[in-house]
Amino acid sequence: MNIENSAEPILGSPKTAEELLEIYFLDMRSALLETAAAMDRIQRAENGNDILKDPRIQKLQEGCEILKNEKPDRVGQLLCLLSDPWNNNQNQEVL
C-alpha cells in the first residue's frame, strides 16, 4: 500500500477531525509562535542575518514547507529531514 496515494488514515481516531483540531489547536499554535519568536531573537542578535544561512535554520524552513503540504505522514517527513544521516558503515556494530 502506497501511503502517499492513500486517502485513508493509517490509524483511525475515535474523535472527529473537528474534535482533534479543538484539542490540539492551542498547542500547535503555541509551538509555531515559540519557533517564530526564537528565530526572531536569533535574527536580532549580532550576526543574526548571517546565521539565517545555517543549515539548521534552513532545515526548519524546509520543515515549514512540509507542514504546508497535504501529503500524509508529515511527522515521518519531518523526522527524516531533521535526523542525522545514517551511515551503514559507521553503525555496523549496532546491527
Image: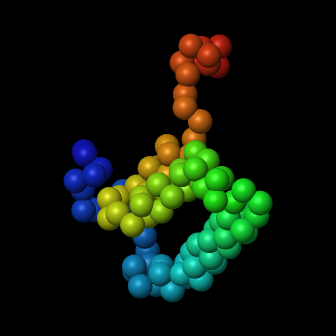
Tell me how the rendering is colored: rainbow
- State the residue at coordinates (24%, 56%): 6
- State the residue at coordinates (62%, 16%): 90
Q: Which quarter of the rendering shows the C terminus?
A: top right
Where residue 81 sits: x, y (%)? 50, 45
Question: Vertically, is 67 above or below 89?
Answer: below
Question: Vertically, is 94 above or below 14?
Answer: above
Q: Is residue 59 left or right of residue 47?
A: left
Q: Is residue 25 left or right of residue 5?
A: right
- Residue situated furthest right in the rendering: 46
Q: Quadrant of residue 94?
A: top right
Q: Quadrant of residue 86?
A: top right
Q: Which quarter of the rendering shows the N terminus?
A: top left
Q: Is residue 20 left or right of residue 49?
A: left
Q: Residue 86 versus residue 92: which sits nearer the camera?
A: 86
Where residue 80 sits: x, y (%)? 49, 43
- State the residue at coordinates (67%, 70%): 40
Residue 85 in view (yes/no)? yes
Question: Vertically, is 4 above or below 19?
Answer: above
Question: Vertically, is 39 above or below 22?
Answer: above
Q: Quadrant of residue 24?
A: bottom right
Residue 9 in view (yes/no)? no
Q: Residue 68 versus residue 36: which sits nearer the camera?
A: 36
- State the residue at coordinates (59%, 36%): 84
